[in-house]
Amino acid sequence: MDFLTVEEKMEMILIYGEAGRNLDDAANIYAQRFPDKIRSRTSFHRTAKQFTTNWSVQPKKRVRRAIVTGGNNEINVLAATAANPHASTRELSGDLGVSQRSSYAKRRVGNRDVECDATSKTDFLRESERRFRNCAPQISVFVGNLGQPKFSSNYIHYSF
């Protein structure tokens, strides 16, 4: 099956109108005008249906869920990961209401200190401590009674 360009689709719509909205006649007229490009009745039907529903022959742009970025979402994902490190990105995205890509990206931010040098680690730890202090009520919702966290060079420890 060949890909139809926008120009071909518009030509098909015009011929469909000339044929009095008859698919068989439209396919025959198109075959007479363009013998090297023979289109089936089904392709005329699909194009006409697309045009009458959308008033356009342009393909629809797919709507994707946007990656939700922000401090609160990052903290929520990191806290949920700290509470349950074996949770999948699908579980996290469903529980927190963020996309899977966003939850994966935020989890990777939490693990990036393992791959960084010493100065990056200390900067990351300072930033983590600051975020934890500023957002303790939000984290406590997900973490519960795990105790006070201790920040080290590799990950966050919780004392019980």
Image (cartoon, grey):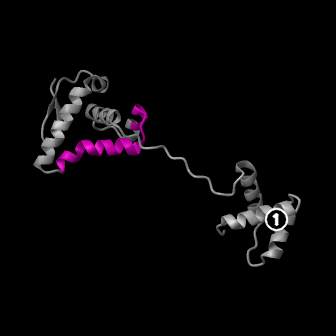
Nearest to the observer: residue 129 or residue 150? 129
Report the magenta residues as a range: 93-115
Q: Secondary structure at mark 1?
A: helix
Q: Where does label 1 land, which residue? A: 15
- Name the side, left or right, on which 120 lies relative to 76: left
Residue 110, magenta (yes or no): yes
Is residue 154 visible in this depiction of the protein?
Answer: no
Identity of the residue drawn at 66% across and 69% down? 2
- Name the side, left or right, on which 134 lies relative to 36: left
Residue 2, magenta (yes or no): no
Q: Quadrant of the C terminus?
A: top left
Identity of the residue drawn at 50% across and 46% down? 64
Identity of the residue drawn at 27% across and 44% down? 109
Q: Residue 131: x and y, percent? A: 23, 32
Vertical order, 10 against 119 (above or below): below
Q: Which quarter of the picture shows residue 15?
A: bottom right
